[in-house]
Amino acid sequence: MRAELKKVCEFWADRGVDGLRLDVVNLIAKDQDFPDDPTGDGRRFYTDGPRAHTFLREMNRDVFTPRNLMTVGEMSSTTLENCQQYAALSGDELSMTSIFII
């Protein structure tokens, strides 16, 4: 999946787009044990997983930065503090975020 997403981003970048919007990108790293959540709605197992940051740093290094792409990550079911981590001043993940709260 990660390799395919890279290919899609590269495809559009190679055709001249200046930026990409990544939909609900903070949901890309799920708990691979797929645990039950009888007292909640399961969000804690699929929102803001630690591998999400690793993957976005990899995408930034391999795709976004070399092609000078502006990136917007739409965030779902998270906090402002978490959004700030994805778009930190270090610039090693996303250019900016937008938050979608239900």
Image (spheres, helix red, strand yellow):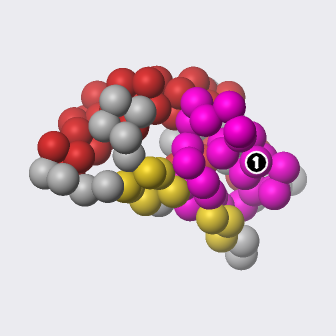
Say above or below: 1 vs 19: above
Say above or below: 72 vs 28: below
> Image check: 40 left or right of 95?
right
> Image check: 16 left or right of 22?
left
Magenta run includes residue 84: yes
Say which quadrant the N terminus sits in: top left
How far from the left and from the top, in percent, is residue 62? 36, 25
Q: Is residue 97 visible?
A: yes
For the view shown, which residue lies furthest in the bottom direction?
Answer: 102
Please report the residue visible at 72 percent of the width from the left and 51 percent of the height from the top: 83
Task: Using the image as rendered, state which of residue 35 and residue 64 is in the foreground.
Answer: 64
**Residue hosting label 1:** 84
Magenta run includes residue 19: no
Please report the residue visible at 84 percent of the width from the left and 50 percent of the height from the top: 81
Q: Give the amino acid type for the residue marked by disc 1 in the picture.
A: Gln
The residue tagged with tag 1: helix, strand or loop? helix
Say which quadrant the C terminus sits in: bottom right
Q: Is residue 27 visible?
A: no
Q: Which residues are magenta?
A: 73-97
Image quarter of residue 29: top right
Please report the residue visible at 54 percent of the width from the left and 54 percent of the height from the top: 73
How far from the left and from the top, in percent, is residue 95? 56, 48
How far from the left and from the top, in percent, is residue 99? 67, 65
How far from the left and from the top, in percent, is residue 50? 68, 28
